[in-house]
Image (cartoon, rainbow, N blue to C red):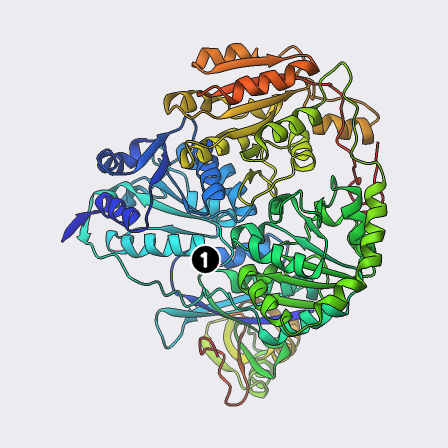
């Protein structure tokens, strides 16, 4: 099953390897990972998307909690949450496809952030489904390169994930 | 006042109440050793860094204090890894300080550089690289706190050479606050009440206790609890000594080489009360068939131990001692008399299990290892600190030496480290110079750290080593006999080991040998009355096996008895 895990960690060197080690040691692949500072510069948020056996993942979550540098662990899959990621896509743009690309970008509320002689670079934000849908439309038009940020996620409503100890 | 990094370490160790350090110098710790030379610690120079860690480990297990090790960078640091992993698996509190190349050279493949932080990340409770001398005092304070609190474990501090020489204002922090680390000591009261109810409803309860009882010093509470309700107790290897082995309620050890009655009691029980134990595969056998009729209560300070291997009906996260005290106070309101009367049938059933002859050997013309261990117990009346190596010597000790007190057995349970016992005994002897400390060893294991003979002679540590010499790596041979058609591969040491008596003498220790059963007692008596380190070479039956045995992956009630 797919899990979206949000972690609050100490913003210091070595934390990422401690966390990654718990996944790699059990043969779990990290599908996406996103790390950045929070409002408190001594704390970082990590969003990890992974798939695996629920019982083993429960053990991984406990082990994550046990790490001295980890302040908080939340498995968002048990909650109602919003999830976004951004992609940059470089698409081949010919005289025949330019119009079509722009239409698709428009429908997906994306932006063209760079225009080259034969390419458009497009920026789109959304959840996994939306990004995948966009890509399935752009692929036949000629995707040259693709960079995804990995997912970030947040609980809906007034509850706060990033409050230590909440 | 400003102090150098090295001075800060010495001052901080003093503040932590450190008395003894096991160490080995080298290039990257020269500034620190320069300061240690006049420091008020008892310092033991070992002959190999692995032994320094095992010695600190033995010191820690015997005393309950944090063991301290200081070694150099590179090979000095990597040599500690087996010792650290051993302590990590058995939750032993330790602080290991390793030298490191100067900060500017880190990552440059400098001479004697090793990424010891990377290497020990999975086998320490936590580790620190100190890059700024200003962080040093706080780091040491945290390291000791992390090592001894919660589920204890080894913590490593990697210290670049330049940081040892630089200066900073020294102020030792009063308190530690780590927002990501707040161990739970008090169990959830509601859960504890539910546990008491569950216990009072049970008809065939068994207490299954482990090293958590020893490390939280909960022996007294456990014994009170067991005796108050009349509940039989089985112990893991790490838990031996939790209640006296000669207490009528003790079933001895359970698991692969556990007693017949302990394993049968677990398999027949309707309630298993696991305290400070972790359902290791050597304990449970085939996990699906483990304690099939039992509800399980699991008390442990480490939430990751709970429901890791078996589904638990009632988990309580907390310190064994705290939770047991709470349970005892709730028992005041229960009808203990009726409960005890209700257990009569259960005790009767267990007596029947006890009547099955499963722990018997015949002492004929060749010395039996079990006989040696029984005689060690008789002569010492159990008043000794016993360490073991790993393999048959370890299992026979667990079976035939009824440990009467906690912290009297030092053995590598989780990692199963051969070569652990001798340096661990050495560490315990440093802590208790007047106690009898005996390493029950094998001819294979002893050779994994025999260089420490030089250390015990140098520091006049009168450790006794009883080598059960069967000329084999015995436990591996036993498995090859049972499961690999007696095809003995790389297990024979017959005729190729050194003469252990001469080896002892070469180092300046005393060497004794016993070749006949009637030699055993006089030789032991002579060893125990010798005020120097003694190696005793017992020539034992070469193909004696450890019984009972549950083959790996079989249910606990599938025991080979002879």
Horizontal side, residue B36 vs residue B521: left or right = left
Does residue B313 appear anywhere in the picture? no
Extreme residue toward the bottom, this view: A157
Please give the name of the residue rendered at 27% of the width and 60% of the height, measured from the top-left corner: B173
Residue B475 rendering spot, x and y as whole percentages: 71, 29
Residue A7 rendering spot, x and y as whole percentages: 50, 70
Extreme residue toward the front, this view: B337
State the residue in front, B136 or B350: B350
Quadrant assignment, res B227: bottom right
Quadrant assignment, res A151: bottom right
Quadrant, the C terminus of chain B: top right
Image: A91 above or below B242: below
Q: Which residue is mark 1?
A: B149
Number of numbered discs: 1
State the residue in front, B142 or B101: B142
Please give the name of the residue rendered at 61% of the width and 21% of the height, measured from the top-left corner: B443
Extreme residue toward the left, this view: B1
Residue B32 rendering spot, x and y as whole percentages: 26, 38
Image: B452 above or below A89: above
Please give the name of the residue rendered at 55% of the width and 22% of the height, measured from the top-left corner: B447
Does residue A93 appear anywhere in the picture? yes
Q: Secondary structure at mark 1?
A: loop
Quadrant assignment, res B246: top right
State the residue in front, A115 or B168: B168
């Amino acid at each position: 099953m797919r899990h979206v895990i949000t972690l609050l960690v100490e913003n210091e060197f070595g934390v990422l390897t401690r966390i990654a080690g718990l996944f790699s040691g059990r043969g779990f692949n990290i599908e996406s990972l996103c790390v950045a500072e929070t409002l408190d510069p001594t704390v970082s948020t990590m969003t990890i998307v992974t798939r695996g056996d629920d019982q083993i993942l429960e053990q991984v979550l406990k082990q994550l909690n046990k790490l001295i540098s980890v302040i908080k662990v939340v498995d968002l899959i048990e909650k109602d949450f919003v999830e976004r990621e951004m992609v940059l896509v470089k698409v081949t743009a010919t005289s025949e496809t330019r119009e079509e690309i722009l239409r698709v970008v428009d429908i997906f509320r994306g932006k063209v952030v760079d225009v080259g002689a034969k390419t458009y670079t497009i920026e789109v934000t959304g959840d996994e489904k939306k990004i995948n849908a966009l890509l399935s439309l752009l692929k036949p038009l000629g995707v040259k390169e693709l960079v995804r940020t990995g997912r970030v996620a947040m609980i809906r409503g007034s509850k706060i994930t990033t409050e230590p100890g909440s | 006042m400003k102090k150098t990094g090295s001075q800060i370490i010495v001052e901080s160790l003093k503040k932590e109440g450190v008395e003894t350090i096991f160490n080995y110098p080298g290039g990257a710790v020269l500034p620190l050793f320069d300061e240690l030379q006049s420091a008020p610690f008892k310092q033991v120079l070992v002959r190999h860094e692995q032994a320094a860690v095992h010695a600190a480990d033995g010191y820690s297990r015997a005393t309950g204090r944090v063991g301290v090790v200081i070694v150099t960078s590179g090979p000095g640091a990597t040599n500690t890894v087996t010792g650290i992993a051993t302590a990590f698996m058995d939750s032993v509190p330790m602080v290991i300080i390793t030298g490191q190349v100067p900060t500017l050279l880190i990552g440059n493949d400098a001479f004697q550089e090793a990424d010891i932080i990377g290497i020990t990340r999975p086998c320490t409770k936590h580790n620190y690289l100190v890059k700024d001398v200003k962080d040093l005092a706080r780091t040491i304070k945290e390291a000791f706190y992390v090592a001894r609190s919660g589920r204890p474990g080894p913590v490593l501090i990697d210290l670049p050479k330049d940081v040892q020489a630089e200066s900073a204002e020294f102020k030792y922090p009063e308190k530690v606050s780590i927002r990501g680390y707040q161990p739970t000591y008090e169990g959830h009261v509601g859960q504890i009440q539910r546990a008491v109810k569950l216990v009072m409803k049970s008809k065939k309860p068994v207490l299954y206790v482990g090293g958590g009882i020893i490390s939280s010093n909960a022996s007294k509470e456990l014994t009170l609890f067991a005796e108050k309700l009349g509940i039989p107790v089985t112990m893991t290897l790490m838990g031996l000594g939790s209640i006296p082995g000669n207490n009528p309620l003790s079933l001895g050890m359970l698991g692969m080489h556990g007693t017949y009655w302990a394993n049968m009691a677990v398999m027949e029980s309707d309630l298993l009360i696991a305290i400070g134990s972790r359902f290791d595969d050597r304990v449970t056998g085939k996990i699906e068939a483990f304690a099939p009729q039992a509800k399980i209560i699991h008390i442990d300070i480490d939430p990751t131990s709970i429901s890791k291997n078996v589904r638990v009906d009632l988990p309580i996260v907390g310190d064994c001692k705290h939770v047991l005290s709470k349970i005892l106070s709730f028992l005041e309101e229960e009808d203990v008399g009726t409960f005890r009367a209700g257990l009569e049938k259960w005790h009767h059933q267990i007596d029947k299990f006890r009547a099955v002859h499963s722990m018997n050997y015949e002492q004929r013309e060749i010395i039996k290892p079990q006989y040696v261990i029984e005689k060690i117990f008789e002569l010492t009346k159990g008043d000794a600190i016993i360490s073991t190596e790993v393999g048959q010597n370890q299992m026979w000790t667990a079976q035939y030496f009824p440990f009467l007190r906690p912290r009297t057995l030092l053995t590598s349970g989780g990692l199963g480290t051969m070569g652990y016992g001798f340096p661990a005994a050495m560490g315990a002897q440093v802590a208790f110079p007047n106690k009898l400390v005996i390493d029950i060893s094998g001819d294979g294991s002893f050779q994994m750290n025999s260089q420490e003979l030089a250390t015990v002679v140098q520091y006049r540590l009168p450790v006794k080593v009883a080598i059960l010499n069967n000329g084999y790596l015995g436990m591996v041979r036993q498995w090859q006999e049972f499961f690999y058609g007696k095809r003995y591969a790389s297990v024979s040491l017959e005729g190729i080991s050194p003469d252990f008596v001469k080896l002892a003498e070469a180092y300046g220790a005393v060497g004794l040998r016993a070749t006949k059963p009637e030699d055993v007692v006089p030789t032991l008596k002579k060893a125990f009355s010798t005020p120097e380190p003694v190696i005793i070479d017992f020539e034992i039956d070469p193909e004696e096996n450890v019984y009972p045995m549950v083959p790996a992956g079989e249910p606990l009630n599938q025991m080979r008895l002879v």
